[in-house]
Amino acid sequence: MSDLPYQRILLKLSGEILAGENGTGIDPSVVSYFAREIKSVVDQGLEVCLVIGGGNIFRGGANTRNIERVTGDYMGMLGTVINALAIQDALEKSGIPTRVQTAISITQVAEPFIRRRAMRHLEKGRVLIFAAGTGNPFFTTDSAAALRAAEMNVDALLKGTKVDGVYDKDPVTHADAVRYTSLSYEEAIEQNLKVMDLSAIALCRENKIPIIVFNFKEPGHLLRVIKGEPIGTILGG
Ligand code: UDP
């Protein structure tokens, strides 16, 4: 047991970050960066679950022209499986044992999601990568992250993004935007702050799982967050 504030975490990373400067697809140098950052926390003895988005490959949802909503959503979910395999490969090259569990059965490439098995993998020190979102259209990988976080009894859900946390307005377009260091779930929902989608926040609130939003693109920030440093924004009740 380490003396860190969290023993078991779920890290949610958007697919978009994986694309790097290209904006789409998978940038191998970013995949290696992911592996280095994740290794830094595994080396601290933490149990780590991962949920990777799929936006770099395909984003479904309401606005996908010419493709039926549900089909687009399944395409997005399959994109997350591709990302999960890329991260698995990079982690294993760094000497970290991993398992991918997917919400859509693809038995040749990954295990199906089985909670009790997932628990066992964590106990054995394997990084667990959850792929294919919730397995259901009309959801997002944020919701999948909240769902798996609750199922796996994690101590915190870490959402790695391209910005330093949650701001009162968009920090990209407003120079005077102020970052919150902490927020309640209610404040995030009422003010419609873009933390995670509503169903994800509601699930975390119900299960009292803190959500920490931080800048994953800054080397070392993930490690600082798991050591309890107040960088980023923490959402709690
Ligand atoms: N998706 C879905 N159900 C899920 C998770 C994801 O239908 O449980 C689809 C949805 O179309 C989404 C796409 O997969 O747009 C990619 O996931 P997301 O947009 O959450 O990825 P991210 O923005 O994190 O890269």
Image (cartoon, grey):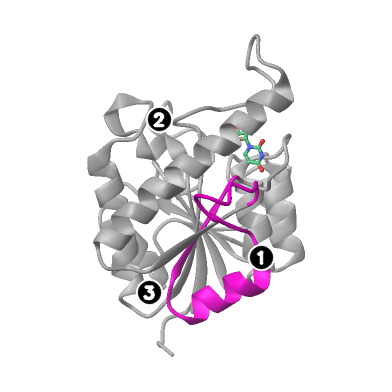
| Numbered circles on residues, count | 3
Q: Amino acid at mark 3?
A: Lys
- Callout 3 crowding tier (Cα within 10 Å): few <14, some 14–19, many ≥20: some
Q: Earlier in the sequence, mark 2 or mark 3?
A: 2
- Secondary structure under tag 3 reads loop
- Residues under labels 2 and 3: Cα distance? 28 Å
Picture quadrant where residue 28 is located:
top left
Q: Is residue 164 visible?
A: no
Q: Amino acid at mark 2?
A: Val
- Rendering coords of residue 81 (x, y %): 51, 43
- Rendering coords of residue 162 (x, y %): 39, 41
Residues in magenta, as a range: 103-132
- Secondary structure under tag 2 reads loop
- Rendering coords of residue 51 (x, y %): 52, 53
The residue pinned by badge 1 equals 114
Q: Residue at x 59, y 39 (%)?
A: 194
Labels 2 & 1 near each other (Cβ < 8 A): no
Q: Amino acid at mark 1?
A: Ile
In this rendering, would 34 be left or right of 122? left
Residue 79 in the image: above or below residue 232: above
Q: Earlier in the sequence, mark 2 or mark 1?
A: 1
Q: Is residue 107 visible?
A: yes
Q: Magenta stretch: residue 180 in it?
A: no
Q: Magenta stretch: residue 121 in it?
A: yes
Mark carried by residue 227: 3
Query: Of the residues tagged 2 and 3, which is closer to the observer?
Result: 3
The residue pinned by badge 2 equals 172
Q: Earlier in the sequence, mark 3 or mark 1?
A: 1
